[in-house]
Amino acid sequence: NAQSASIVGTWVYSEPSVEFTSQNLLAQAGGLVAANHIVNKLTPYYEKVGIKPGTFTINFNQDNTCVINIAGKTQQANYTYDSSAHTLRITGQVIGLSFGTAYATVSNTQMSVTLDSSKLLDVAKNVTSKSQNSTMNAISSIADTFNGMKTGFKFVKK
């Protein structure tokens, strides 16, 4: 599958990722500065739920299967990646939840996978214990700061 060739390999989480759905938002009021600020705010909350550099990996195989390891939990799933539309769909129950369709930007060495904020919260809730409600509320309030913003994960190729 030529469309998924660029995504095949092992990717290791490095930091939160923030993308704006509109170039106008990025241009307005220092969007890039805001994005970096949000990444810095999200990092400690991601860490509280066990998402730290090196603790979240995705291995995409040539046959459209993948292995996801997040906070010590491993799951096999299937995926489709459309490089022209920048969509990544991971199907099957991934660590107890359905990932659905994410927006993925892939280069030779980096990949950014972003989701609507509500999907990101689902991922975080399934990784964490129930005692982390304040962390979930903090992630939610940060993610709700900007309309038209997707939040997620930045990976580096291993």
Image (cartoon, helix red, strand yellow):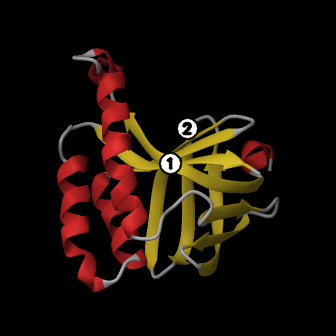
Q: For residue 27, what is the image quadrant?
A: top left
Q: Which residue is mark 1?
A: 15
Q: Residue at x 30, y 23 (%)?
A: 31
Q: Which residue is mark 2?
A: 85
Q: Earlier in the sequence, mark 1 or mark 2?
A: 1
Q: Is residue 66 above or below residue 104?
A: below
Position in image of residue 56 (x %, y %): 58, 64
Mark 1 or 2: in front is 1
**Amino acid residing under circle 2:** Ala
Residue 21 visible in the snapshot: no
* Label 2: which secondary element: loop
Q: Is residue 39 left or right of residue 109?
A: left
Q: Is residue 58 above or below residue 6?
A: below
Compute the Cα span from label 1 to label 2.
23 Å
Task: State how many labels appear.
Answer: 2
Q: Is residue 17 left or right of residue 88?
A: left
Do callouts 1 and 2 mark residues in contact (Cβ within 8 Å)? no
Q: Is residue 96 above or below residue 112?
A: below
Q: Is residue 155 left or right of residue 46?
A: right
**Amino acid residing under circle 1:** Glu
Position in image of residue 30 (x %, y %): 28, 18
| Labelled disc at residue 91 | none
* Label 1: which secondary element: strand
Position in image of residue 80 (x %, y %): 64, 57
Q: Is residue 30 above or below residue 13?
A: above
Q: Is residue 85 left or right of residue 46?
A: right
Residue 93 visible in the snapshot: yes
Q: For residue 120, what is the image quadrant?
A: bottom left
Q: Residue at x 63, y 70 (%)?
A: 68
